[in-house]
Amino acid sequence: MENYRKNRLPQTKENSDPKERFDFLERTFMDGLAHASYTPTLQTLGSTSGLSQTANWKEEEQLMKRMFEAISDDGINFALAERFTNSILNGSLGGESWSVPLQILPCANVQPPQHKKCAEPGVRACSGCRLVSYCSKECQRAHWARHKKDCKDTLNSDAWVPKWMTEMRRPEFPNHCPVGMDQLIWGNVPAINLLNLGKNEGLSYKRDLSLAFPASGDIRNVLKTINSIPAQYPGKIFVAINDHNPRVTARNFLLLLSISAIKDPNLAADITLHLWYSVFLPHAYAMRVLALTASVLPTIANRQIDWKTEEKLRIVAELNPLFLNQIQECTSSSGLEPHHISQEYQRVMFAPSRTDCYERYLCRLKRGHRMAIREFRSSGLVLPFGAANPHFNTPNATLFTQSGLWLMDDMQSPLDGWSLAEVIASGKTHGSNEEDIFGCLYFYLSDQLRKFKKQLSSLDITFYITNDDCRDFAASIASSSNTGSTQLAREGSYPLEFPMRFDRIDLSNTVDDGYVGYKRSLSDWGPLLNKSNRHSTLLTYSMNWTREGKGGEPENDKKVSGRLIETFTRDWETRKLSFPNASPVSMMMMCMVTLPAMYENSKYFNAYLKKRAVAETASRLGLRMKPKHTITPRRAGVPLDADASAVPKFSSTDSWYIEVCLSEYGFYNRFQEFQLVSR
């Protein structure tokens, strides 16, 4: 292969005029990026389906920086810079054949050493694991030497038991002692449609809408909400997205930019998906994210980015120094070596001190799901199990510190933020089997992100992104509102047009005692509900209330827990038909996670609310707790309009398994909706 770097870069400004030098840099960069995915290596990053390649991303990154330095030279106009940015974001780069987004499950016959893969769809599932599929018997036979290791793995056997059983010792389940930095980068509660127009204003609603996510976490609730809005909705939509963690805020900004700025919907969805959830990115994807950021940052004025598309989308980001610093860190992989990043990720995921906690989860899973979970913990890629992955060769800097430390703990998973029933259903429409749960997630997220992009191109939406403490954020809105202004005036920044009242406010679990608490959260945000909309709603959920209050967990009531165990045992007579070879320890772990779902703990939650004077605080603010919910159910697994005492009902053994055993969500979270009292 020709070495495109044999022509050295111009060393001084005198070597050429600015435009000529800019053109040379652009050609060199594009040529290098085109060949980057063909740099093979035998270095494996833990994937069972392929070998990763080491791309020379450092040189491309430096070239990128020099490109944008050249923009400031005399004679280099904005049109040239825009041309370069568009060529990176939307151009078709040679050598990217392995980066083509998947539309349907691919044939699993991938041969990385030969850099070959079958281009046909996978339609014949392997009967031994159902994790991969092939286009033909010929491809299955050709791939057996590679696939045999997975298919015959002990973890894929009904005979598998956790290590504490084979080592004949007591398991160790340390409480709240995760490995890693324990930042909440991914959502840990399934995404919520905060509007639910059909149950509130109606699908024909035409007035403008303002939504606030004061403690947003990632953008899953934003995506789910925007995707629910009718395509023909004529009003304006204002969305305030705030989080106190500058890394979370920076990631949200980059995710919104990537899905919006890249024109091809399939490519935009794929880049955004992997930027959101995968530990490694294709080199060409990482360069596109860098190009996007490098093109936006020079537009900063008065500590703000105000970015618009040709459609009606606008993204306004208010930058404090931490936020800006995190954006820059998130788009630079120059200090992150792939081998070291792989080691760090696996150090956290397979820490010996956490083996029993990890295997306790595996105990309640079907064997295919055990394999899928381990594969993600090994590779860190949200892809179908048998998909090609050698081109995922650049660390995703948004998930690591600059020194290469994993930001989250060892048990966080992309699965936690979504309805697994919806994930599996979507995967099946693209050819995935439910055993390949991360393949299902890949197709589900691809569908959701493509729809999100379509919504962003047709609806009139303005996103406001801020990095604040949620109390300070509320105070700044209230202060501006009290002056009669329609602009959010912030110290050191230019006032921006901002909605002063909101039709929906999602407070997440800031109401937990360990965060802001109910009283202060309601006092801060209750007055900011839109009084002209009788459907205005403030949503909260209590995640830690069983630890902060008394009762709430079945083990605290031995009589009740005994009856629940008896009920589980009776139900198991039917359910065990789906788990004919389940070991006693598997049955026990399934029972342990089922008891909270069966437990009716509303009296304890009501006592928890009463002790904190939630009803009195709401009344003082002109609010009340909704007698019937219209946004989201009070707890997982119950109908939307169910009362507080309802317990989950499962329509089938499969439903129970997916919602209780496969999901890590749990059933202690309690949602509470507040509405304005009618005058």
Image (spheres, grey):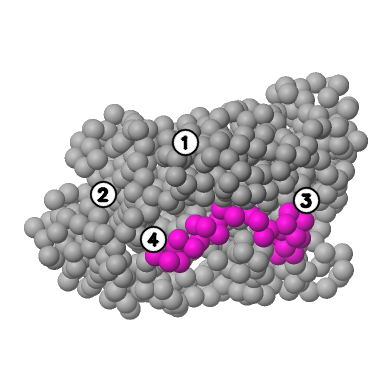
Label 2, label 4: how far apart the Cα atoms are = 21 Å
In the rendered structure, the answer to whether residue 63 lies left or right of residue 551 reads right
Q: Nearer the viewer, mark 2 or mark 3?
A: 3
Q: Earlier in the sequence, mark 1 or mark 2?
A: 1
Q: Is residue 549 above or below residue 575?
A: below
Q: Earlier in the sequence, mark 4 or mark 3?
A: 3
Q: Nearer the viewer, mark 2 or mark 4?
A: 4
Give the residue at mark 2: 210
Q: Tell me if I can see residue 447 in this picture.
A: no
Q: Is residue 330 magenta?
A: yes
> Are the residues tagged 4 and 3 within 8 Å (C-beta)?
no
Could you tell me residue 347's position as x and y percent? 74, 64
Query: Which residue is drawn at the image coordinates 44% and 52% (left, top)?
Result: 297
Label 4, label 1: how far apart the Cα atoms are = 27 Å
* Three-letter code, disc 2: Ser
Label 4, label 3: how far apart the Cα atoms are = 35 Å
Picture quarter with the N terminus: top right
Give the residue at mark 1: 80
Q: Is residue 405 above or below residue 426?
A: below
Disc 1 element? helix
